[in-house]
Amino acid sequence: MRILVVGAGALGGFVGAGLTRAGEDVTLITENPAQASLLNEAGLSITRVGQDEVTVPVHVVTSAEGLAPFDLVFIAVKTYQTEEALQPVLQATHDRTLFLTMQNGFGNAECISALVGAERVLCGITYHSIQHTGPNRIHFRAGTKPIQIAPHAGKITPEIEAIGKLLTGAGLPTD
């Protein structure tokens, strides 16, 4: 499965790095060229309570132009950036691409649905704490419950179940 993570901040970086470590085909996209350059050169360093620091090599771009279509787009930008961040990446999707949001705030699923259709939007909730500790460094503290994902419209499909298994396989238990 080809995965695009929109936003290379704390949540996007962590999810992207976890999926990359699990062997998935992941690209992160940010509009910040300096951030993209640093992450491509140095990787993303992650600390966890009680564990050694791990640095994960990640693939980061600043444009979706010319990229082959992705099967899953994980949205990890601020609510007010959602439409502006998604518009340019739509060129790198196909009619079966699913869009998963775990953003804070209200109206994200509705905004994404207006762009791609509600049947392609998944909503997620995470109970994890992830924070920046430096330009290419994040700190992760496991939450009290698994990530939860569900379709914004429609029913749970085998494709949605596969995404839950994908996240679980990347060290992010998901229901």
Image: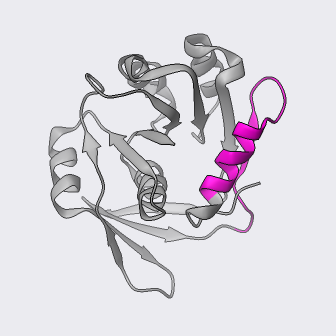
Closest to the observer: 95 or 102?
95
**Residue shown at 45% from the left, 37% from the top:** 77
**Residue shown at 59% from the left, 18% from the top:** 111
Q: How many marks?
A: 0
x, y percent for residue 149: 72, 44
Using residue 130 as the reference point, say whether residue 59 is left or right of it. left
x, y percent for residue 13: 40, 53
Q: Quadrant of residue 27?
A: top left
Using residue 118 as the reference point, say whether residue 11 is left or right of it. left
Name of the residue lying farthest toward the right: 155
x, y percent for residue 174: 71, 57
Q: Is residue 149 magenta?
A: yes
Q: Is residue 152 above or below residue 140?
A: above
Using residue 100 as the reference point, say whether residue 144 is left or right of it. right
Using residue 159 as the reference point, say whether residue 46 is left or right of it. left
Q: Is residue 170 above or below residue 80?
A: below
Closest to the observer: 141 or 93?
93
Split into 4 quadrants, where in the image is the C terminus?
A: bottom right
What is the image's colouring? one colour
Which residue range is magenta in the image? 144-167
**Residue shown at 58% from the left, 15% from the top:** 116
Q: Is residue 93 above or below residue 123?
A: above
